[in-house]
């Protein structure tokens, strides 16, 4: 066995893992964590990073163009201005050319072109401005360094990737993998042994992109992350503590994210919105705010991509983007209560508390009480222009994405989501409430479309339906459906009985609507793919080995390093590691 610190080691003790254009050496004793499942996470991150670099380049060129036009307009106005009430005297052509070229015998204070004598210096500065600065990325929790290596080798425009970890074995593995990937990786990737929180706090406004992919909750890293990213930069953030975010431990969720989750079919989308609200809260403390460009719920985790901007005035709009959620305990009815509103008077905008309550104390549909959750991010969680650009880029570079089919399916579904409709309904749950046979999804969608409302699917659930129709319309459609498909009588105090006892105000039209299928459905494009392998989920944390005791708890297939994602704890009370880059423990 060689000395890893000096760059020598026994290759027989390692397995070479190739993903994309990067290769890493993984010790056979599971010394450093690696999760094959997170290939979807890494592929989507690379696709978003490519689009981010292109967008920043376009934004920079537009800024330089506006600045040049403004300078030209100012110079024209200055050159046309009369001197002592008279028009400026015209100079000879040779003098004009000499002055404009910077070759005149005597430098002029200002020539007829409106250009100062130090024009060559300014021209150099403008030329430099036309090229945006190279992108600098921080991977706060690097583990094996696979993600950092893929960023450096696969994304054009990435100049520097700083990979951090506070586990010495992980830092040594990352440094070993950097050398293993050759000169390009060695020139671009830097591995440091450091606490990510301290490092980000001591490097404010330095990184264009900050990637957070921790073990469990990212909450302890958010405050320092929003300070270390530049204005207009991006934070990529993963959360794998889904039991907490989806309502399993509401008090823990509040302590980490400042929000109460609700147990419901839309819990995964609510988890995304809780995380976004938390990032916004941390950003607001420094007069900054976020704009989400992509938010995904996939496998056993969620991941969000947000732009960070600085503006004290724009920050005031945050309450308009947050809402509380009222969820009926008897039926699927839910309602949103915005935190804030605006009042406009004579071009003056005043920010006020939101009106409430938006609902009575008891549910108007079934008579039961409401649980209250939130606050959550109720503004759009995707930028559809970005989603389209990312999807186009992925399709154009198919061979460079190992998880191509899966991420295309996810992005295609997201591209068809209603952007301005928070949360979603589950048709099967609606039918379970009234104890009826479920209509075909296309029939239910047609009824809503024929009633004048919009509807779409959601990437967070194959059975989820997003619609801008109010809950009374939803239940009217279900009442009409039950009239045509009678159900057995229920106890009068059941939610379904109360709902069906009322006559529908809307007469549903179940005739097949033209737009009842999305473009992807009409073209039979796959949107929800099965897992590529059995037991596709979280793996054992680094430094742990599967024992006979683990096998009895997790099943015989756990011996291959797999476990079902429902099993999140080991016999000693330690949680299994559920991401690909987390070596830094939670405090």
Image: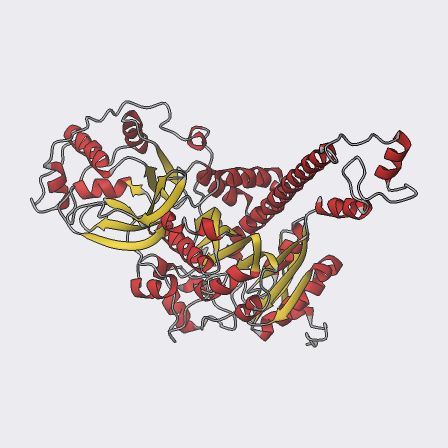
Of residue 372 and residue 127, the one placed in the foreground of this image is 127
Visible residue check, residue 278:
yes
Q: Quadrant of the C terminus?
A: bottom left
Q: Is residue 20 above or below residue 75?
A: below
Residue shown at 22%/27% (left/top)? Answer: 508
Q: Where is residue 14 in the image (x, y as percent from the top left)?
A: 63, 67
Question: How far from the left and from the top, in percent, is residue 520?
Answer: 45, 32
- Horizontally, residue 132 falls left or right of residue 322, namely right
- The residue shown at (32%, 36%) is 467
Residue 547 in the figure: left or right of residue 158:
left
Q: Can residue 533 be seen in this view?
A: no
- Looking at the image, residue 344 sits to the left or right of residue 508; the answer is right
Q: In which quarter of the image is residue 94?
A: top right
Reply above or below: 519 against 211. above
Q: Is residue 288 above or below residue 421?
A: below
The residue closer to the viewer here, 47 or 32, is 47
Residue 93: x percent and y percent?
Answer: 88, 30
Q: Which quarter of the picture shows residue 568?
A: bottom left
């Amino acid at each position: 066995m060689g000395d890893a610190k000096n760059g020598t080691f026994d290759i027989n003790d390692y397995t070479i893992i190739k993903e994309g254009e990067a290769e890493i050496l993984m010790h056979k004793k599971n010394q450093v964590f690696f999760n094959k499942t997170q290939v979807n996470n890494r592929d989507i991150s690379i696709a978003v990073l490519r689009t981010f670099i292109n967008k920043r380049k376009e934004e920079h060129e537009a800024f330089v163009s506006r600045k040049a036009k403004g300078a030209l307009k100012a110079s024209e106005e200055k050159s046309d201005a009369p001197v002592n009430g008279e028009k400026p005297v015209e100079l000879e052509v040779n003098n004009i050319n000499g002055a404009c070229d910077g070759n005149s015998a005597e430098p002029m204070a200002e020539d007829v072109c409106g250009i100062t004598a130090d024009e060559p210096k300014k021209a150099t500065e403008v030329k430099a401005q036309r090229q945006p600065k190279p992108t600098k990325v921080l991977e706060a929790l690097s583990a094996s360094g696979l993600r950092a290596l893929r960023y450096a080798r696969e994304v054009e425009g990435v100049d520097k990737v700083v990979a951090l970890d506070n586990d010495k074995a992980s830092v040594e593995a990352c440094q070993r993998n950097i050398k293993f990937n050759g000169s390009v990786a060695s020139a671009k990737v830097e591995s440091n042994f450091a606490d990510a929180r301290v490092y980000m706090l001591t490097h404010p406004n330095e990184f264009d992109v900050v990637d957070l992919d921790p073990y469990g909750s990212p909450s302890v890293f958010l405050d320092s992350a929003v300070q270390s990213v530049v204005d207009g930069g991006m934070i990529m953030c993963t959360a794998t503590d889904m039991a907490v975010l989806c309502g399993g431990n509401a008090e823990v969720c509040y302590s980490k994210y400042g929000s109460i989750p609700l147990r419901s079919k839309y819990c995964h989308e609510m988890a995304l919105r809780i995380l976004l609200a938390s990032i916004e809260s941390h950003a607001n403390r420094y007069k900054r705010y976020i704009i989400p460009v992509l938010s995904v719920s996939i496998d056993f985790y969620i991941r969000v991509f947000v732009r960070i901007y600085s503006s004290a005035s724009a920050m005031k709009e945050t309450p308009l983007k947050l809402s509380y959620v009222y969820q009926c305990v008897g039926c699927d009815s839910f309602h949103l209560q915005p935190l804030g509103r605006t009042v406009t008077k004579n071009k003056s905008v005043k920010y006020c508390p939101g009106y409430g309550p938006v609902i009575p104390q008891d549910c108007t549909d079934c008579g039961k009480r409401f649980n209250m959750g939130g606050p959550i991010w109720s503004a759009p969680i995707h930028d559809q222009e970005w989603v389209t650009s990312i999807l186009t880029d992925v399709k154009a570079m198919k061979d460079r994405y190992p998880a191509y089919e899966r991420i295309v399916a996810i992005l295609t579904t997201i591209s068809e989501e209603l952007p301005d409709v928070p949360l979603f309904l589950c048709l099967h749950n609606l039918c379970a409430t009234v104890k009826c046979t479920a209509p075909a999804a296309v029939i239910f969608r047609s009824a809503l479309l024929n009633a004048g409302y919009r509807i779409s699917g959601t990437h967070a659930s194959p059975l989820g339906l997003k619609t801008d129709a109010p809950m009374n319309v939803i239940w009217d459609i279900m009442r009409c459906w039950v009239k045509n498909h009678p159900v057995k009588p229920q106890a009068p105090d059941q939610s379904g009985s109360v709902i069906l006892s009322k006559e529908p105000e809307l007469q549903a039209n179940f005739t097949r609507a033209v737009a009842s299928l999305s473009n992807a459905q009409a073209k039979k494009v796959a949107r929800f793919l099965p897992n590529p392998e059995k037991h596709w989920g979280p793996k054992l944390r680094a430094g742990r080995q599967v024992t006979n005791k683990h096998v009895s708890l997790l099943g015989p297939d756990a011996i291959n390093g797999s476990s079902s994602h429902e099993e999140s704890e080991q016999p000693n009370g330690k949680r299994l590691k559920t991401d690909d880059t987390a070596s830094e423990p939670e405090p």
